Amino acid sequence: MKTLINQYFKFIFPLLIFLLLVREAAILIATPDEYYLEDVSFFAPALIKADRQKASFSDQLSVYISNRKLVHIRYKTCVQTLNRYRIFDPQKSPAQRQKCIQMLNVALKAAPASPLIWLELASLYTQQKNTAGQMNQSLFNAWQIAKHQAWVGQRRITFSLNNWAKLSDANKIHAKADFMHFSPRNRGIIKSLAQQYLQNPIAKPIAAAWIAESPLKTQKQFVGYVRAAR
């Protein structure tokens, strides 16, 4: 037994470590620096420099390595291409958008309880005509599975105010409920609403109504953020 243990640590264990390092190195090589360092924003995907070689390499690796980072790379590359088409070649946008939507639907089969995927899907639907129903359902799902997560709630509120005219009555109620629930314990959400109040004309009367029904402490914090930003 002692001999087997010695052999394991002498040969097998170093080999396993080597294979693990090779795997991680391959993933790192396939990951553009912008992805590796960037804090992901699902509402305003960054315009990342084209890196076709690395994107192609990640596609090749995906057959052998199941890794969420690689999935994310491929999706971000899809959105990057979509953003470029929307500016320079609008005729190609619909087909590219459907490709991105298909990627998210596949991701949801593996992770149906991911609120960020549902929110990103809702974001893509806002870019299409006659898809308000799908957008509202995706937003509702994001609320249903993450009602009490403040960082998701803040994103839902921002998304809702940016697309208020398209929201169903139920999602408008949920957006207000999110703010009322999270604002007493999360200053970031109050600051976010203040920014919407100043920058989004549609959100201004909505924010004012929400603040009017909020506790005095929340009202004072909101006024402070508005004054500081002016």
Image: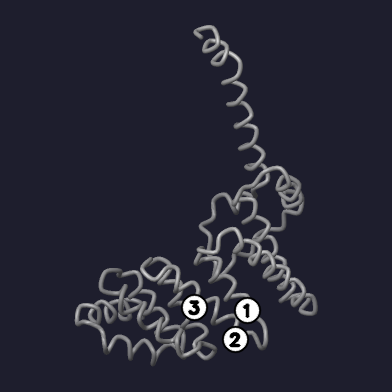
When the figure is inspected, residue 51 is found, relative to residue 10, above or below; the finding is below
Spatial distance from mark 1 to mark 3, Cα to Cα?
Answer: 13 Å
**Which residue lies under the disc numbered 3?**
140
Around disc 3, counting alpha carbons within 10 Å, would you say few (fewer than 14), some (14 to 19), or many (20 or more)? many
Mark 1 / mark 3, whichever is N-terminal: 1
Image x and y of residue 175, in percent: 41, 81
Q: Which mark is residue 125?
A: 1
Query: Mark 1–mark 2 contact, CB under 8 Å?
Result: yes
Mark 1 / mark 2, whichever is N-terminal: 1
The residue lying toward the viewer, choosing from 59 and 144, is: 144
When the figure is inspected, residue 220 is found, relative to residue 154, above or below; the finding is below
Please tell me which residue is depicted at 68% across the width and 64% down the height of the picture. 103
Callout 1 secondary element: helix
Mark 3 / mark 2, whichever is N-terminal: 2
Spatial distance from mark 1 to mark 2, Cα to Cα?
Answer: 7 Å
Judge left or right: residue 116 versus residue 109.
left
Image x and y of residue 32, in percent: 65, 50
Around disc 2, counting alpha carbons within 10 Å, would you say few (fewer than 14), some (14 to 19), or many (20 or more)? some
The answer to which quarter of the image holds residue 193 is bottom left
**Which residue lies under the disc numbered 2?**
132
* Residue type for callout 1: Tyr
Judge left or right: residue 143 versus residue 189.
right
